[in-house]
Image (spheres, rainbow, N blue to C red):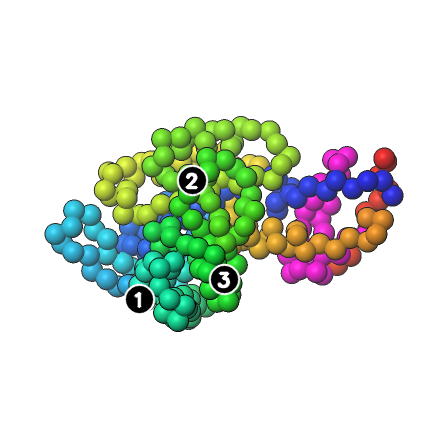
Amino acid sequence: MGKRFDILLFPGGTSKAFTLSYDDGVVQDRRLVEIFNKYHVKCTFNLGYGVLGYKGDPKFPIDISRVETSEVKELYKGHEVGGHRLYHSDVSSLGAPYSMYEILEDKAQLEKLVGYPLKMFAYPFGFFNEKTKEYLKIAGYKGARTIKSTFSFDLPEDPYELNPTCHHTDKELMELAEKFVTMRTIKPSMFYVWGHGYEFDGGKNWDLIEKLVSYMSENGKDIWFATNGEILDYIQAYQMLEYSVDGSMIYNPSAIDVEIMTAFGQKEILKAGKITEIGETPL
């Protein structure tokens, strides 16, 4: 059996994934969802259950009212709901008992609303530390997003420190989008944009997000549009693959089909729960 240099491929045999993440569950999410659905892109919306239904202060220049609990399941259908702390508290500054309460209660109540276990979390204000990560692992979260822009398309090294490519207001946004669409690569890459829906009202720039997602959709032939959780699940399924000593057999113990490409351009779909025999490859 020749040497193996397998490379992760996303569903559809592509090396590119595009995902979005928006926080707080504000009423502007209703318009955001319409735009995302129109262009068939997917987003992870991070909510704080304890502030759902909040009516914004009329003296504040931007409406930061939250959506109602009764509309959460239907509104975010086809996307993903993630956690954002019960009352949007700083998860890095509070003691363990209260931190765990806010994380767990938020997760438990949101799960009742949407009907599935939550996988993703977004750190309120971007604040976190190593203890925070441990709290999220104990609560059953699979990953968490920061607010640190990388301006790159690298996959996360630590799923609990998931740094986005950029915020939607970063001046490099469309430049990055064009670079991502046009680049030729076999390296698995992810373009990850985040923000808050109310920012489009404040900046009077709703055209900005529609320009981005329409461009990505129109040029999305070789791009996997997925939620944050779907991407992490897929990466973790790839990392779980089990190889025989000589590399001729690969067992996929996960519940997700995983695609790979060998060093010689051979594409293989490793079926969930199955052993795939890989043919002889030259040295």
Q: CA distance from mark 2 to mark 1?
A: 28 Å
- In terms of secondary structure, where does tag 3 sit? helix
Identify the mark at residue 149; answer none if there is no mark: 2
Question: Mark 3 — residue?
Answer: 134
Mark 2 or 3, nearer chain start: 3
Q: In the visual, does 4 lie left or right of 101?
A: right
Q: Is residue 212 above or below residue 88?
A: above
Q: Nearer the viewer, residue 245 or 79?
A: 245
* Tag 2–tag 3 contact (CB < 8 Å): no
Q: Quadrant location of the N terminus?
A: top right
Mark 3 or 1, nearer chain start: 1
Identify the mark at residue 50; answer none if there is no mark: 1
Q: CA distance from mark 3 to mark 1?
A: 22 Å
Q: Nearer the viewer, mark 3 or mark 1?
A: 3
Q: Which residues are magenta?
A: 248-273
**Residue lying at 46% horizontally and 60% vertically, measured from the top left:** 131
- In terms of secondary structure, where does tag 2 sit? loop
Q: Is residue 105 visible?
A: no
Does the stretch in magenta take in 255?
A: yes
Q: In the visual, does 22 lie left or right of 180?
A: left
**Residue lying at 56% horizontally and 43% vertically, measured from the top left:** 155
Label 3 crowd bin: few (<14), some (14–19), many (20+), radius 10 Å = few
Identify the mark at residue 196; answer none if there is no mark: none
